[in-house]
Image: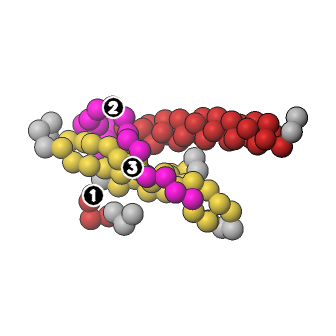
Amino acid sequence: MDAAAWLGVALLAGGIWFAVDSLRARETATAAARERCRSRELQFLDGTVALASVRLVRSTGTLSLRRVYQFDFAHNGVSRHRGQVVMRGQTIERLILDPAERDT
């Protein structure tokens, strides 16, 4: 195989890794948001989280992906509020229900 073929294989493998990693992170974020809403007797609206941003960050000397997910919830079923799950890799950094807590 020549260099172009190896590059193609590496890009394909990287794309597959990114897709699988992103699905796992989204599942973790959705489960965390659902549980937080349940524990506070809030309605977790739409049943999922939506990706708001992805970026590379350096933490303890290593590079990792920071993903910010947003979700909607309601206190009384009428007014929608926006929550946020911030993940570094597969770890939840913050789960925010109060807009005053946001800093990203």
Q: Secondary structure at mark 1?
A: loop
Quarter of the image with the C terminus in it: bottom left
* Amino acid type, label 1: Asp
Magenta residues?
36-56
- The residue at the far top in this view is 47
Residue at the (65%, 60%) spot, across then down: 63
| 102 drawn magenta | no
Disc 1 from disc 3: Cα separation: 17 Å
- The residue at the far left in this view is 78
Foreground of the two, 64 or 33: 64
Q: Mark 1 highlights which residue?
A: 98
Residue at the (54%, 40%) spot, across then down: 22
Which disc, if any, is residue 47?
2
- Coordinates of residue 13 in the picture (x, y in percent): 71, 37
Which disc, if any, is residue 1?
none
Q: Is residue 6 left or right of residue 63?
A: right
* Foreground: disc 1 or disc 3: 3
Q: Closer to the N terminus: mark 1 or mark 2?
A: 2
* Amino acid type, label 2: Gly
- Coordinates of residue 88 in the picture (x, y in percent): 55, 54
- Coordinates of residue 33 in the picture (x, y in percent): 38, 42
Disc 3 from disc 2: Cα separation: 16 Å
* Amino acid type, label 3: Ala
Q: Mark 3 highlights which residue?
A: 52
Q: Closer to the N terminus: mark 3 or mark 2?
A: 2
